[in-house]
Image (cartoon, rainbow, N blue to C red):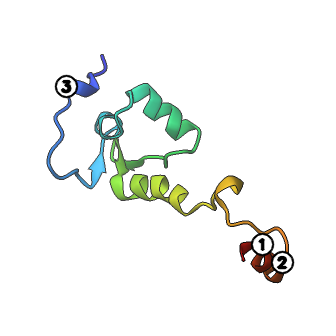
Amino acid sequence: MTTRKADIPLTSRLTAYVSREQGAAELQVSPSTWDDLVASGKLPKPRQIGSILRWRWQDIDATICKDDAAPLEPFFREPTNGSPKERKRHVA
């Protein structure tokens, strides 16, 4: 039986290697959603320590944060229509 994420106590400092349940609770998703994210490649695969599977939180964080460096959507980009000289004329 899967432990409810609300029942998993989180420490003030997240451990370096987390279980499936700890990671899911930290991201506030269900363990099955965690599994889906791993299967789709949106989260890294676990590391095997003997017979135990653990995710290095540093890898999870890096995977999540790499999207922050993605280019902005076209709507949010600076206008590129016309040359700088033409844009300057419209600003005056």
Q: Which quadrant is the C terminus positioned in?
A: bottom right
Per the image, the residue denoted by label 1 is 90
Q: Position of residue 70 (x, y in %)?
A: 60, 60
Give the vertical position of 2 relative to 77 (above or below). Answer: above
Q: Which quadrant is the N terminus positioned in?
A: top left
Q: Secondary structure at mark 2?
A: helix
Q: Position of residue 38 (x, y in %)?
A: 51, 40
The reply to whether callout 2 and callout 1 are in contact (CB within 8 Å) is yes
Judged left or right of residue 62, residue 11 is: left
Judged left or right of residue 54, residue 8 is: left
Mark 3, other Cα within 10 Å: few <14 / some 14–19 / many ≥20: few
The reply to whether callout 1 and callout 3 are in contact (CB within 8 Å) is no
Real-space CA distance between mark 2 and mark 3, rounded to the nearest whole angstrom: 61 Å
The reply to whether callout 2 and callout 3 are in contact (CB within 8 Å) is no
Q: Secondary structure at mark 1?
A: helix
Front: mark 2 or 3:
2
- Identity, as a three-letter code, of the amino acid under mark 1: His
Residue 76 sits in which quadrant? bottom right
Front: mark 2 or 1:
1
Residue beneath the point at 59% across and 39% down: 40
Residue beneath the point at 63% across and 59% down: 72
- Identity, as a three-letter code, of the amino acid under mark 2: Glu
- Identity, as a three-letter code, of the amino acid under mark 3: Asp
Per the image, the residue denoted by label 2 is 86
Per the image, the residue denoted by label 3 is 7
Real-space CA distance between mark 1 and mark 3, rounded to the nearest whole angstrom: 60 Å
